[in-house]
Image (spheres, rainbow, N blue to C red):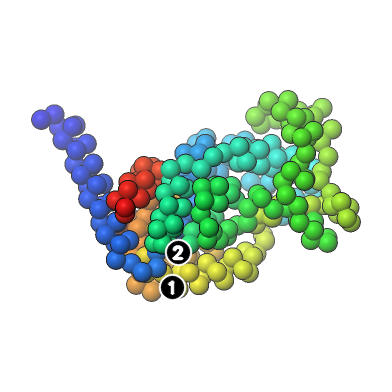
Amino acid sequence: MDKNIHEINEVDNNKNENITKAVEQIKKSKYVIAFTGAGVSVESGIPPFRGEGGLYEKVSENVFDLDYFYAKNKDCWYMLVKHIFIPLLKAKPNLAHIALSEIEKKGILKAVITQNIDTLHEKAGSNNIIKFHGSIDIFKCTKCMKIYRFEQVIGESTLNLLKDDKNDVIIDKNIFEKFEVPRCKSCGAIIKPDIVFFKEPIPEKALNESFNHAQNSDCLIIIGTSGVVYPAAMIPQIVHRNKGKIIEINKEPSEYTNTITDIFLQGNASEILHNIQNLLN
Ligand code: NAD
C-alpha cells in the first residue's frame, strides 16, 4: 500500500477512535456543558479575530477598546457596523451550532457557554446559552440604560449608505461624513453595543452562571477556542480541577491540549460535532 494512504488511514482511524471515546464519555456523564469560541463560527463564514484572514487585518483591536469607543465614538461605531455587525448578522448557523442544539434537546447538554457575540447558538435553536462576552442583539444607552435592538439603532438608510463603502480597510470619507452615531431616543446619550469591551468587567450574571455550571459539570466540550482570553479561559480549568473530563474540538492544538484535555479531536467543528450527534442517537 502507498505510504501516504497508509498514513492518512491511520490518522482517520485515530480520529474515529477518539470520536467513539468522546461519545462514550458524553453518554456516561451526568452534567455535560459546552464552551465555545470563534472557531465554532468559522464555518459560518465569520473569521476569527487573530491570524491570517482574521478580522484584525481589516480593523484595529481598538474597536473593542472602551477608551477608544468614548474618545473616537464615530470612528468606532462606523468600523463596528461595517466590519462586525453587518457580517455577523448575515451569518447562518452551521452544523456545529445545530448539533449542539440537538444534543441539548436530547437532555444531554445542560448549557452552552459562549465567548462569541454572533447570536448563532440561539439561531440554531439552543436554549440555555450563557453569553460570556455579551452579544450583538442588544444595545444600551450609556446614560439611562434603555435597551435597543439592532434594527432600532441601525436603520435601513444606514445599511444602504454603508453598502456603497466597498473598501476593505480605508474608510470612504463621503460616506463617513453622512454616518450618524446612534443616540438614545429618550435622553440623547450615546448608545453602546452590549458586548464586553477590553477594560470592561464580565457581566456578573454571566460570570456566576458560567462558574456554577462549571462547578457542577463532570464533562466539558471545548469547541473552537484557543483559550487565551481571560477570565473565560478559566472555565474548562474549573471542570478539570473538579475531576471532570475535558473533550476538545479544535482545528489546531490550544492552551488546553497538552495540559487539561483528556480527548483531543482535531479538525472542523461542524464535521466532528455532527458525527458525535449522530452517534448519540
Ligand atoms: P481564537 O481566534 O483565539 O481561536 C480560535 C480557535 O478556533 C483556534 O483554536 C482554532 O484552531 C480554532 N478553529 C478555527 N477554525 C475552526 C473550525 N472550523 N473548527 C474548529 N476549530 C476551529 O478565538 P477565541 O479563543 O474564541 O478568542 C477570541 C475572542 O474573540 C473571543 O472572545 C471570541 O468569542 C471573540 N470572537 C468572536 C467571534 C464571533 O462572535 N463569531 C469571532 C471572532 C472573535
Q: Quadrant of the N terminus?
A: top left
Residue marked by disc 1: 216
Q: Which quadrant would residue 205 be assigned to in this image?
A: bottom right
Q: Residue 125: image x %, image y %?
A: 52, 51
Residue marked by disc 2: 110
Residue 271 is tagged as none
Q: Is residue 89 visible?
A: yes
Q: Residue 129: image x %, image y %?
A: 54, 59
Nearest the eye: 8 or 95 = 95
Which residue is painted at 55% across and 44% down in the image? 49
Direction from residue 32 to residue 57 in the image, left or right: right
Above or below — where is 52 with respect to 266? Answer: above
Q: Is residue 227 visible?
A: no
Q: Residue 84: image x %, image y %?
A: 64, 41
Please state which amino acid type lies under the numbered disc 1: Asn
Please state which amino acid type lies under the numbered disc 2: Lys
Which residue is painted at 37% across and 45% down in the image? 274
